[in-house]
Every structure is written in C-alpha cells, then in structure tokens.
Image (cartoon, coloured by chain):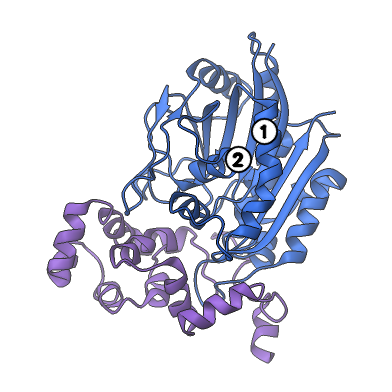
Chain colours: A blue, B purple
Amino acid sequence: MADLFAGIGTSHVPGIGAAVDKGMTQNDYWKPLFDGYEPAREWLAKEAPDVVIIVYNDHASAFSMELIPTFALGVAAEFQPADEGYGPRKVPTVQGHPELAWHLAESLILDEFDMTIVNEMPVDHGLTVPLSITCGQPEAWPFKVIPLCVNVIQYPQPTGNRCYQLGKAIRRAVDSFDRDLKVAIFGTGGMSHQLQGERAGLVNAEFDIAFLDDLTRNVDRLVNISHVEYMRESGSEGAELVMWMIMRGALDDDAKELYRHFHVPASNTAAGLIILENP
Amino acid sequence: MPLNKPYGDIPGTTIFDADMARKGFHLNQFCMSLMKASNRDRFKENERAYIDEWPMTAEQKQAVLDRDYNKMIAQGGNIYFLAKIFSSDGLSFQYAASTMTGVSEDDYKKMMLEGGRAPAGNLYLKEHESG
C-alpha cells in the first residue's frame, strides 16, 4: 500500500530559485537562508520518497484570467518549467506519476472534492523553487511529482478549513492506492509577505512563528484563520499559507515536527520551512 | 446582495476580488500577452500602439505608460500580472515594490534587511491614519 509518511511546508519565493540558478547561494545575502535548508535536504535524500505531491500556486504562468481553477491536479507524465518572462528556469523537467495522480483525481471527486484535471500545464517557480530548496541542483529530480495547483490569486481563495479537509481526503486516497509507494506532500507559499500597494514589504514574524508552532500544537486554530486575518496579519500574499493546511490535513493528527528554519528576508518575504512526520 | 468586504480597512492594500477582476480583466490580459517575446518586442517598439490594441480604459492605458503600479492596481491590475510589465522592463519585484511604497529601491531593500515593514500601526486603517 502507498504510505504518506511526511510533509514539508516551505516558501517558494522566486528569488530563491534565481539565487540557485545564478550560483549565489553562498553570498552574504543568501547564505543564512540556504544554510538552514541543508538539514532538510539531507533528511529528504535519506528518506527518498517515490512521489511528492506538491501543493503550490501558479503566478499567471499556466493560468491567466481566462480560467481560474480553485484546485487543479496535474495528471501528466511530465511538466515543463514555465517561461515566466525571462525564459524557463534551467531545471530538470518535472516527472509526474499519472497512475497515482489519476487515482487521486477519481478518489477525490468521489469523495466530493471536485478537482480540475490537468493533462498539460507548465509549472512555474511556485513548484520548481520548493524542488530546488529541497533537492539542490541534481541532473534529474529524485522523485516523481504530482502538482496540485491552488488558486490563491483571485479572492476568495479556498478557506483554510476547505484546504485542511482536502488534505484529509488526499490522505484517504493515498491510503487506498494499492501499490507500495513512499509518498510525501509539500505545502508551499508564504510566509508573511505583501507584494503590492503602499503596505508592500509587510513581514509579521510573530504571526509566522505562531503558525509554525501551531502546526503541531494547535491545528484547530490554524484551520479557522479567516481570509481577512491572513491578509491583515500576514500581508495580502500571506494567504498562500492555506496551501500548508492541505499538507497538514494529509498527515496524522499527532504528526511530529522534525525540523524548522525561519529567515527574513528572502527578497520581499519571510521564508519558512518545516518538516512534519507521522509517528 | 453583495458579499461584505471585511478586508476594506487594511491600509495600503487592495484585495483582488470580483469587483477588481471585472475592472481589470483587459489590463491583466494585456499584461499576460507580454509573456510572448514577439509581443514584448512590439510593446517596446511602440508602447502606445500596442496598448491601443487592448480594450482598456484611457486611465488604465495612461497608468501603464506611466508605470504607475498603484494606479494600475486601483484600476483592477493584479500584481502577478503587472509583474509581466516590470519584467519586460528588466526591473525587479523589489524595484516595483519600492515605487509602490514611495521610497527608493535602496531604502526599500534596507527595510527588508531590517526585518520588513512592521505590523504595528499597519494592520487597521484607523491606527494607520492616527499613527
């Protein structure tokens, strides 16, 4: 049987990807951030999952205003890095896992989570930066990836509770997949940041650290954070943290924190990373 | 009956909701077109002519020509779409953010290095104005 054993929450700031691509991870600005990623890389390499479900958002790359799916599940065999205006990142093509992805789509829809099924889509920094953070610069990504793209750009985003419940449904779906596969899930985006308007640059470290704490101590509080609380307290783009709730929902209620890292700034953003593992 | 907007009292922040999406549809789709190199070239060659191909309001067009990002946002622009404009200009997110906050790029970078804009005084319109 497939086993969903752990989750990672991580920011997906494009500047982090650019720092990797341009070989700047050891300069004064980026080193403290990347040093904190090392233990997570070592842990993931040792655990060697077969498949990682990456919950992320598209940034006007694959989806424009033409089509705004709330939850879009990538079922393709491969996904190309998107051209975000500077040419595609020179990172490996992302290999999918169509068999598990289609199983997820069927299970989730029958479980009343009406996913949009995507057979073709480029994946932007929202998905490839978490890969760079957790894997560095390999010739090929060391696991298959199932992209789960969430709308967090057009208000209203799905609620934290809906995301958490979707995570639980993903867990049920993985549990019922009749193949020995080691599966992890990443929830990406956040932490506090605001990229627009006169309040751009907002960082609320207190909010972020309480969020990291309560992923294991008080999940009920996080599940009930409203849109307006996210936007007010953690910046208009801080509401991306609902994607971490999908990751959290897919884990056991008593999942343990193995590691965390928090650093300000990564460009305009407070960068956080946490590893949670089922007991 | 419209839904209420509990986010109306967050200072210096425009939430990209249904009203903004309706207002900004053509502006955002124009931005999206800049993802193609051939369109970027045409835009750079004659901004006015390229922009006139899009059914935007005169105010939206002027805000684009002026690179006034706060005005574009007020006219329904979404920052991830507007990013295509400053990317085409070869400018960074931090540069664009600094123009929106009315400080120099260096001052903005310094603020971020010092931990970012503090929440105190910046969460509610009321405290923001009195502060």
User: Callout 2: 10 Å neighbours few (<14), some, many (20+)?
Assistant: many
- Residue at the image position 80 percent from the left and 40 percent from the top: A258
Q: Quadrant of the N terminus of chain A?
A: top right
Q: Which mark is residue A44?
A: 1
**Callout 1: residue from which chain?**
A
Residue A163 lies in quadrant: top right
Give the side of residue B76 with respect to residue B62, left or right: right
Residue carrying label 2? A134
User: Dots 1 and 2: beta carbons under 8 Å?
Assistant: yes
Kind of residue indicated by mark 2: Thr
**Callout 2: residue from which chain?**
A
Give the secondary structure at mark 2: helix
Q: Quadrant of the C terminus of chain A?
A: top right
Residue A76 lies in quadrant: top left
Kind of residue indicated by mark 1: Leu
Residue A63 lies in quadrant: top left
The percent position of residue A96, horizontal first and vertical second, equals 47, 24
**Against A190, is A245 above or below?**
above
Q: CA distance from mark 1 to mark 2?
A: 7 Å
- Residue at the image position 71 percent from the left and 57 percent from the top: A262
